[in-house]
Structures are given as structure tokens and as C-alpha cells.
Amino acid sequence: MGFMKRFRRQKSPKNKDFFPRNDYHSVAAYHGPDCTPRLNDKILRRIFEEVCPHSMDESLDSSEDSGNEGCMTCDMRDLAHCALVKRQWYSVAAGLLYKSIRIDAVHYCELEEVYAAERRRKSRGGDEIDPPTTRLLQLCRTVRDNHYIGQRVRFLKLPYMTRESCKADLARTVSVLPNLEYVDLPDGFYNGDSTCHTLRQELQARCPHIRKMKYNEGAEKSLETLLQGFWQELRVIEINRIQIEPTVLRRVLGQLPWLSEVSFSEVAWLNDSVLQPVPGIPEFPPLDTIKLRKVKNLTAQGLAQYLSHPVSRDTLRTLKIKDCPSLTVPALHIVLQMATNLRTLEFTATVSASLPIEPIPPMTSRSLHTLNYEVISSSSHQMYPPADSYYQYLTTSLMSGSLPALRKLFVRDPSFPESLTLAPPVRPFADSPHHTPRGFNQPLEVFSKGMDELDWIFTSIIPADAYTGRRGSLSGGRPVSSYSAHKGLGPQWGGEARKSVVVPNGFGGFLAVPADDDRPRSAGHLGPSHHRGFSNDSTGGVRASFMSQVGRDKRSSRADLWR
């Protein structure tokens, strides 16, 4: 009997106050009045948005391209717990919980190791557990049992393997989501695969508010079904290697009154005639965004003719051109001249020959805010890479003041910011009243990188007073950049952090100066960050304090790291 007493459950003492409480591990409790009923639904919603940030994700991007920082699965769990706290919180939290649903394959935190060990232990005697598939089945059961929850769902994002292997479960789920606007679909759905026939029928019949759709090679019949009235609220269409008559395309696009973005990729039949007005056929619709990739037969003159229409010219905001041989750099000024409201231009090309000797008009635009100018030489072993002439043309356009609204510039040349400092000097006291010094009249952020670099190198250019020749203002601290430390400028430039700033030299040119805040400090003068990282207190010592900060604070150089 004495042996069996060890397995008996110990009873809790009657007088709990007799045992002392460890105040060190206790959590402070609030014993005042409950003020949460005074919070209205608007404030509660704002609080819950901070608890689960991805619940406000309304982008039309796939799960792989729309991830947020942190563990989104844990954030959703915390939001679900908030919904169960009070009846007042349920309606607000549930509206966010089922608005934008995201199913991830793993936890993006330390809990993934714990859950993975539990799944391995449970799956020893049977099949291995697939967490995203299980979560999709639970979601399907929930929305099919409660139609009110199904009506709340607007965005559904799934991992790649889940949407490829669970087509039937996905079809059953979307069949009860009448307000769905975006869902991650398997690749076979976009090319007319017969295995996705049921999923396509459910999506066309039950989800009329779909905003984005893609049509790849083999989905010509699926594209023509839009003429029957499906998905009239489409905003974005991607057309990749589709073989279709231009007349049918114009009629399909004319059936979509909310269309704002069209992407064409590797379509040989797309030429200038597709954009031209033809009697009896709907005109090519005015679009906010046009993306062209490997389109061979479309020229700048065709785009200019399309933009000659006032509605099209006033609507276009973003234009992306990538590897289009008929849309070259010498013709960009034609497009920019017609696109009077263009805000973003992305141009990517691989060139094998330099620009012609004949002068080319500069790129001129009073509305362009962001320019992504990536010109790459086809061969990197040439003594004079052909891309240099293209960047020289860009420098000429910038120094001529033809892009006054430009604020962000992306280039694939790590030495491009340095070329801006080589502008010819201007006399500080010009005798002629009509003399206009060259240079920038607006602040410019330059992001540059080479072929072997992964991160963009940031350089901030501060404008000067073009008429007085004064140096640009540096009030509020110099902007930090990561430019030119790899050029061998010495440790005073920030070491491996590669930080610098480009400012006017007062004579029409520019001068690169080191960033004050990132200069290495001597061993005898340690800044606040060093005292923080190497505090010698009695609780953890020098090493413990350093390890607590190594994941949060980054040192500006190796010298700072070991001081």
C-alpha cells in the first residue's frame, strides 16, 4: 500500500495563503475598474489590427509574395483568443479573423521546433501529419457549417504544395465564399488543366467578385469565357504566351469595366495595331498599369499613339518594360513625352551595342516619381561595356533638369552615383543673367547594385540652391547611405557598412562625404551603443550582455564589434 500512495494525486492545501508566494515570478495584476467597455468598435478594430497585422492584407499577390514580418500563424491565434474574451470583442475580432485568411506551412517562430517534435511523435504509428492541409480542412468545415463566416472571407492565401495537392478541398471551400476577391490557385488552373475543371466551375458560379486572374499557354478557351459575363469585377489580368486573335482580346477587355492592370508576356502577336482604334471593335481600355515582358513587335510609336487619347494618357500611372527589343532606350523619350501622368517607369534590358553617336533628346517628364533603369551588358568581359553609354545618357538627362519630379532611382551600376560627382563645374559668379547652372533641383535617392550583389546600395543626394550656389542644407542630420566604402575610401567612411552621403560642392557639381554618425570610434571613447552592448553588470557579465544585443544591434564595422 505504501508503494501505491506515490501514484495518488496530491491534494491542494486548504489554506493557500499559508504558502509564501514568489513575488519575483508573479505577474502584476490590475485590480481597478474595467475600462474596456468604454472602447468603441473603431478603437477595438485598430487594436486588433496591431495584434494580427496580416488580417489587413488586401493585396492581390500570392502567399509567397505577400508575407509580413513575424509569425502570422501565432498572430491569428492571438486574434482568435481576443474574440473569445468578451461578447463585445467577438464581432470586431471575427470580422478581421476571417477577412484575409492565410495558411502557412510552418510557424515563423521558435514554436515550430516544438510542434514539429510533437507531430513526429504522433505520426510514428500512422501517416505523417501535414499542418497546412489539416488547417484547410478545418477552414472548409467551419465555413460550410457557418455561412455568416463564409460571407466574411475576401482573401484566401495558401502554400504552393497545399493548393497543388488539395484541389478538391479547395473547390469545396470556395463554393461557400460568395464575397471572395482573391485566392491562390494551382498552376493547372491557369493553363486549362482538366484536373482543375471542378474548381473552375465552382469559382465561376459561386465567386463573382474575383479581382485577379492569370491566363497561361493553353487557357485560350478559359479567356474567351469572360465574354459570357464571368468575373466582371476583374482588376488585374496576366496574359502569358496565349495564342488568341487580337479582335477577341479587345472584346474580352471591353467586357471588364473595372480593369486597371494588364500584363503581357511572350506574346508575339501583340503589335501596334492592337492598341489602335478600329471601328466596330471596343477600343483598348485605359489602364493604370501596363506590364510588357519579351514583347517583340510593340514599338514606342504604338504606345505613343495609344497615349494620344486623353483618357488613356490621364489614366496611365505605371509602365513596366522588360526585354522588349522594339522598345529601346532611344525611344523612351517619346513615351515619356506622351505619358503626362506617369508616376513609375521600370525599364529592364540587356544590350550588346552602345548607343548611336547621334544626339538623343533627354528623357523628359514632369510627373515621373520613380525610375527603375536596369541596363545590363550582354558580356561582362568587354573593355568598354555597352551599358556605360546608356547610363551616360541617363546622367545627361538628370543633369539637364528634365526630370524635376524624380525622387527615387534604381540602377544596375554600382558606380553610377559616383558619375554624378563628375559633373563639369559651373562658375560661382556668372556674369550672364541668363546663365543656368547644371545640377539637380530636387532631392534624389539612388539605389544601385552590380550583377554580383544582392542588396541595393543607397545613396542620398542633397540638392543645392541652383541660383546662389550654396551648399545644400543638412539640418536634421545627414541622410545615411551605403555607397562607395568598397571603393577603398578608408575606415572613416563607415567600414563595411558602406555609408556615405553626396552633397553639392557649391560650384554646380557634387561631393561625397563620410557619414558622421557611422565613423569608427576609438577604444577610449565608446558611444552609448557600446555601453549598451558591453555593460559589465553583476547579472550577466560582459558576454551575457553582448549576446543579448547581438541579435538586435548591428555594429558599423568589425573594429566596433570587438571593442
Image (tube, rainbow, N blue to C red):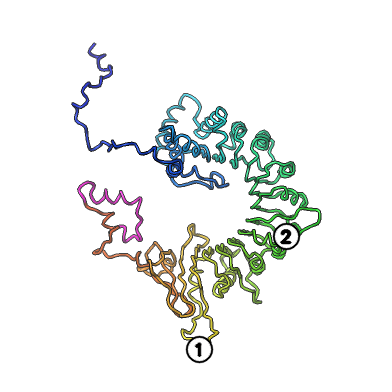
Q: Residue under circle 1? A: 431
Local secondary structure at mark 1: loop
Q: Residue drawn at (42%, 28%), measured in percent from left and top?
A: 121
Residue farthest right in this picture? 280
Q: Residue drawn at (56%, 33%), measured in percent from left and top?
A: 150
Camera-nearest residue between 185 and 248:
248
Placement of the N terminus among the 4 image quadrants: top left
Who comes first in sequence, dot 1 or dot 2? 2
Q: Which residues are magenta?
A: 537-563
The residues tagged by marks 1 and 2 sit, at their Cα atoms, a distance apart of: 51 Å
Residue farthest bottom in this picture? 431
Q: Position of residue 102 (x, y in %)?
A: 51, 40
Placement of the C terminus among the 4 image quadrants: bottom left
> Disc 1 marks which amino acid?
Asp
Q: Residue under circle 2? A: 297
The residue mark sitting in front, 1 or 2, is 1
- Looking at the rendered structure, the number of numbered marks drawn on it comes to 2
Q: Residue drawn at (46%, 75%), measured in percent from left and top?
A: 464
Query: Mark 2, residues whose alpha carbon is within 10 Å: few (<14), some, or many (≥20)?
Result: some
The picture quadrant where one finds residue 380 is bottom right
Q: Residue drawn at (48%, 71%), measured in percent from left and top?
A: 418
